[in-house]
Amino acid sequence: MRTAEFDRDRVLDVAMEVFWEKGYNDASIQDLSQATGLQRSSLYNTFSSKRELYLATLRRYHSRCTEQYAVLASASDPLAAVRDLVESVIVDELGDRRGLGCMVANAALEFGGRDREVNALTAYNLTTMAEAIRSAIHRAQRLGHVPDTLDPVATAQAIVVTIQGLRVAAKGVAGADREQWLRTAAQACLVPLTR
């Protein structure tokens, strides 16, 4: 199958699911070929290597996340939007029966800072999220909903770290205790944004 004969975005979405579930090392070319319905040669002709396909899926994942972050910029109540973002993570994790977590967190954990390009993509995703949250907090300050003394950069970074921690903890905390852990951590990180 030639590159022009398939939908690249669909292939990336399917490959992303394989990498997201199995991780980079455990996802074989056979797994990717079978899931996408493409021959190995078509995958290599289009993406040149498994690694390049993985990097492309991380970029695709980032574009999905960016759509979520855009909601923060357009929300009439920026604090509610930040709280909703954190709540959406909890809902995702409690409903995730496969234990996928966050692809960015998974990549950071799997590669552990040993791959410059993966590092750059994970950092870009986290920085983009932090900037969206910082901007929402700054808007809330202009609206008088948050004191001017609150540092929006530090608060946004703390929320991002908490979100990633929620994703990781959801994989490791026993089912009966999971929701309490996630909700307690989320409430603690959002205290500075309480009106």
Image (tube, rainbow, N blue to C red):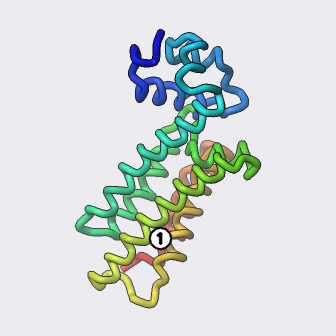
Give the residue at x 54% y 58%. 126
Location of residue 180 with respect to 6 vertically, above or below: below
Q: Give the vertical position of 122 relative to 36 (above or below).
A: below
- 72 with respect to 133 (left or right): left
Disc 1 residue crowd, few under 14, some 14–19, many 20+, Cα 10 Å: some
Nearer to the camera, 160 or 8: 8
Q: Is residue 192 visible?
A: yes
Quarter of the image containing the C terminus? Answer: bottom left
- The residue tagged 1 is 190
Give the percent coordinates (x, y) of residue 93.
Answer: 52, 45
Left or right position of 140 against 14: left
Query: The residue under label 1 is which amino acid type?
Result: Leu
Residue sitting at the far bottom: 149
Query: Is 28 displayed left or right of 132 in the figure?
Result: right
Please identify the quarter of the rendering in which residue 149 is found.
Answer: bottom left
Query: In this rendering, is residue 45 above or below 159?
Result: above
Q: Position of residue 142 (x, y in %)?
A: 30, 83
Q: Secondary structure under badge 1?
A: helix
Q: Position of residue 74 (x, y in %)?
A: 26, 62
Instruction: Give above or below for 44 relative to 51.
Output: above
Quadrant location of residue 141?
Answer: bottom left
Q: Is residue 173 visible?
A: no
Q: Position of residue 137 (x, y in %)?
A: 39, 74
Residue at the spot x=68%, y=46% of the render?
A: 172
Which residue is depicted at the point 54% across and 56% down? Answer: 124
Work out whether residue 168 or residue 22 is closer to the camera in this orientation and state it: 22
Q: Nearer the viewer, residue 87 or 150?
A: 150
Tag count in the figure? Answer: 1
